[in-house]
Image (cartoon, rainbow, N blue to C red):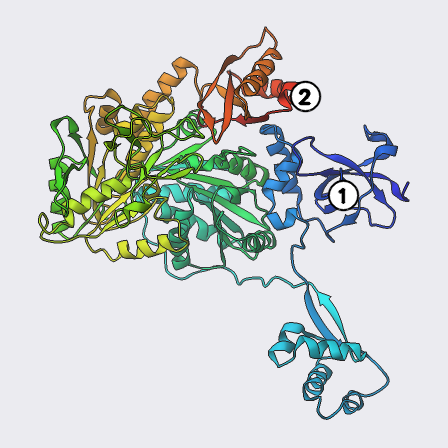
Amino acid sequence: MPHLHHDSLAQVALAVPVGDFFDYLCPRHLPLPQVGMRVLVPFGRRLLAGIVVGLIDRADSQVPIAKLKPIEQILDDAPIIGDELVRLAQWLSHYYHHPLGDVYSVMLPTLINQGRPITQPIRHYRIISSDATPDAIIARLPKTAKKQRAILQTLTEHPHGISQTTLMSLGATRQVLKTLQDKGLIEPFDTLPQPPMPSPATLKHPALTLNDEQAQALDAITDACDGGQYQAFLLDGVTGSGKTEVYLQAMAHTLAQGKQVLILVPEIGLTPQTRARFGDRFDANICVLHSNLTDSERLIGWHDCQTGVAQIIIGTRSSVLYPFDHLGLIIIDEAHDSSYKQQDHLRYHACDVAMVRAMFAKIVVVLGTATPSLEQMKLVQDGKLHRLMLTRRAGDAKAVRYQLVDMRLGTQHTMHTDGKRSDSTLSPVTVREIRARLDKGEQVLVFLNRRGYAPILICSACGHQADCPNCDAHLTVHKNNLQPMYSTLRCHHCGYITPMPSHCPECHSANLDSVGTGTTRLVEHLHALFANPQVSQTVYPILQIDRDTMRKKDAWDTITRQINTGAPAILVGTQMIAKGHHFPNVTLVVVANADLGFLSPDFRSPEHTAQRIIQVAGRAGRAEKSGLVLIQTLQPDSPLLSLLMRDGYHSFAQKLLTERQMLGLPPFSHAVLIRAESNHYARAKDAIVQARQLIPANHPFAINVADAPMTKKNNRYQVQMLILAKHRPSLHSFLDTWWGQVQALPSTKAVRMSIDVDPVGW
């Protein structure tokens, strides 16, 4: 038994899938750890870094003292996790029913989880004090040792030491420093760097003049900030209404008080644009956080947020989990976007976490969007969100006009440069309007939320379809026009890739047809229409913007620079281009297939489809030029589509809210999705069935057990159980007990069980 530090035990949260924390002995040779420090502890045969979440008396432990192990090492001199972050971690663990240690592993950068120092010490050197004078010490060195003499001379002028970096910039080498050290003339020592505190944030350019609606919204936000209490706002403004200017002026108010501002964006692609916009307005230290950063960059960003070096923080959903020195305002742009929901591991929603965090810190949070989610509209109705309306576009921008294009009348056939004709998936009306806009020197955006060349490859002789061997999904055709031999079939779910076949594997026919249209095929058709000299007198650039073309690190910057030149061009993209971008010369938006989303079995699909249509439509006519939106559909008489076009998004959403209430669906009920995943379907099914049997017969819930929408994915089978409850507290009270019982079932040990509170789809 080690010598113990008083009678205290440390409760340590570890990144393991079981338990909230584990008790460890505090040995006497180590200082007593504090809550929020990292410690190195034995766990099985491994040593793991964990977070101290509490100190208790030995008598309070549920584990016999003889079975407890001691802490091996304390990794920090002071807590790296403050009280606010500890409280947030506890809330995340409780609300999402996720192990506390694993919550911390999600919140902390990888290098911190690995036990690495948060700041790297800086190596310095100084002369070892002796009775001899510095000149006498230097005189002992051979005259040929010029570098050694020079280093010693420099160090005599700096008795408190000089950094190794500075010495090496003056001509020193590691070998020379080692030689002097071996001679007992100098000694190394380390210091921790002090973060350079930035100057107070200032304005580079004066703020723009606000209209009455913007001014009222700003006053409400700044008054709430000055009140020092929690307040949540929904900045509900049509696209192009100047929400960003309201953000900027609210930020200026907060920064002037010496506080930090956190801005959340849904996609990495929006961070460069947002940074440029804010950097143009403020002379401040701006920190950008997203998943493409290296581990070292993420650690630096984390530390800058914690110490207050970062004044403006722009990031994707995980940024809401970072520590802050003095956070004063949280802004969530495009707050309706489903990208704010984490889809694996700790399945949190960044908007919900931001509101909870603002509540803990007693600050203001602003959710900005033109198309609020139904959950957000329900929060407004319940008085939990205060709505601020912006009903008209800022400046001279005019409201966009909408026009439905009946695709039942046929499509435009295109002539390719090789003489082949094909269906362009665009109506003659659409093609004429595109050409008219390009001829006037304007830009056109064509939206199709389906990447690749075609979603299906089918044999016209026997009907065989190319399916993924690992998933219940069709393979998508990815065509390489320049090098056809490199064309492939890909699964967008598991990443499976195989070369494009030349013959059907079933009947060996060569009659293989690509059915349907993806962005690549649409670009091909547009090239035939607007870059074929036989058809078009002027050749216009056609820019494809989707996940396939934006993989390179600088791809987005390159293409936005080209767009921002204002030269006539056609932009073809998925939902990646529908969010928050400002392209002043885009005057026409074409929604190539509005029916895709309305035909989905997912009950949320009409809401998400309408949001995408309105958002992408908002890219048109954002400057002084008027904008037109053409919506191609095979169902122009659809009641939902007609309502959206006639009365706008809010009336559309209100109708969906009424339907949800009648059906008892979220947001009028509260959902949790339990999923079992295994290499064997029977095991996954059995785990869910046994979990269902643990629910008492007199339960107040609506329960549905079914295969997942995609039962087989990446060679693993998924079976799920949906639980709907009218009241959130009763649901969580039930989960507190039941979920632990489920995890203890023998049938669940051989499968991967997950819990998703407030799922966005099922």
* 608 up-or-down from 204: above or below: above
Secondary structure type for disc 2: helix
Which image quarter: residue 163?
A: bottom right
Which mark is drawn over residue 41?
1
Residue 424, image x, y percentages: 17, 37
- Whether residue 33 sits left or right of residue 624 in the image: it is right
Out of 151 and 536, give the one closest to the viewer: 536
Q: Is residue 383 visible?
A: no
Which image quarter: residue 86?
A: top right
- Whether residue 372 sits left or right of residue 67 in the image: it is left
Which image quarter: residue 409?
A: top left
The amino acid at mark 1 is Val
Which residue lies at the image location 64% right of the left edge and 49% below the top edge?
A: 112
Q: Earlier in the sequence, mark 1 or mark 2?
A: 1
Out of 628 and 448, give the one closest to the viewer: 448
* 661 up-or-down from 586: above or below: above
Q: CA distance from mark 1 to mark 2?
A: 25 Å
Residue 243, image x, y percentages: 36, 44
**Quadrant position of the C terminus in the picture:** top left
Residues packed near mark 1 inside 10 Å, few (<14), some (14 to 19) or many (20 plus): many
The amino acid at mark 2 is Ala
Which residue is label 2 attached to? Answer: 744
- Whether residue 22 sits left or right of residue 365 in the image: it is right
Which mark is drawn over residue 237?
none
Residue 370, image x, y percentages: 34, 36
**Quadrant position of the N terminus in the picture:** top right
Which residue lies at the image location 23% right of the left edge and 31% below the top edge?
A: 511
Q: Is residue 408 visible?
A: yes
Proximity of marks 1 and 2: CB atoms separated by less than 8 Å: no
Residue 168, image x, y percentages: 63, 77
Out of 502 and 337, give the one closest to the viewer: 502
Residues packed near mark 2 inside 10 Å, few (<14), some (14 to 19) or many (20 plus): few
